[in-house]
Image: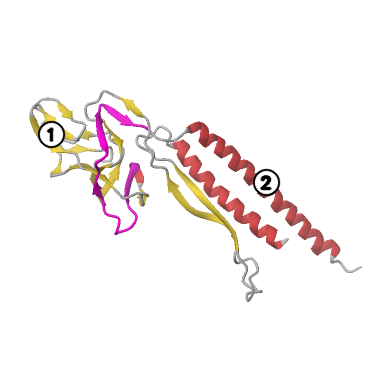
Amino acid sequence: MIQGLHIATQGMTTLMQKQDQIANNLANVNTTGFKQSGLFARAYQKYLDDDQQRVFANREVKADEAYIDYREGPSRKTGNTLDLAIRGSGFFTVMSPNGVRYTRNGNFSLNPDGFLINTDGAKVMGREGYIRIDKAKEPVTVTATGKVLQGDEEVGVLKISDFKKPYRLIREGGGAFRPRLPDNPPIESSGFQIKQGFLEGSNVNAIRNMARMITTYRNFEADQRALMAQNETLDKAVNQVGRVQ
């Protein structure tokens, strides 16, 4: 009975964490460049013959690792010349107050000094430094290879970075990522195209996540009922069966 309480409690805790991931996905269904996440749960049972005092120490149902789905989201046409979307593999490289970060959100604009920035004010990096645009000159054209042109003048080339797959990145706010480990350096992406006047949408499938949320909730309810049943059985064993007449 104690084992049943232990396992049911662990299952409910894991399902709550999974529900948090799903809720975050649904909250960002319209966020530009957002990548949905999920949760791996591990269930395993291992007995140690020489450890009779911790009979449930190695029986676990727990969250193993949160993962990020890096599949490309749908492109949405905006017509804004500074909106850019990456088709294929890679990330825009920006300089945030906390250092270099990587993002799929290409919703860019110009700061008062003419530097290309993202929605958080981080400067967009090119291969030769920050990209600066003269507002008094011709409109900006961005080629499929990332060249930023004003008329016939090249003002920079977007730095599109990539990493070895599977990606080992840590999600930060504003759709930014950073490498998980120091031995995971960025490399230059070779399999991409830039689409000017488009933004990459979230890759969240709202219907699928709603179905997962309902399933997770029902599984939580099942574990809750199992916990209550175990508790009632334990109560009877302690207070009725074990009572001295």
Which circle marks residue 222 in the picture? 2
Mark closest to the chain's N terminus, 1 or 2 = 1
Residue at (19%, 39%) from the top-left corner? 158
Quadrant of image for the N terminus: bottom right
Q: Dot 1 lies on which element?
A: loop
What range is drawn magenta here? 174-201
Q: Nearer the viewer, residue 232 or 47?
A: 47
Number of marks: 2
Which circle marks residue 215 in the picture? none
Query: Would residue 182 be counted in the magenta stretch?
Result: yes
Q: Residue furthest right?
A: 245
How is the structure coloured here? secondary structure
Question: Is the residue 171 above or below the residue 51 in the image?
Answer: above
Using the rendered image of the protein, determine whether residue 113 is visible from the camera's viewpoint. no
| Residue 29 pos. (x, y %) | 43, 34
Q: Dot 2 lies on which element?
A: helix
Using the rendered image of the protein, determine whether residue 240 is visible from the camera's viewpoint. yes
| Residue 223 pos. (x, y %) | 66, 49
| Relative to 42, 115 lies left or right | left
Query: Would residue 29 be counted in the magenta stretch?
Result: no
Rendering quarter of residue 118? top left
Label 1: which residue? 133
Quadrant of image for the C terminus: bottom right
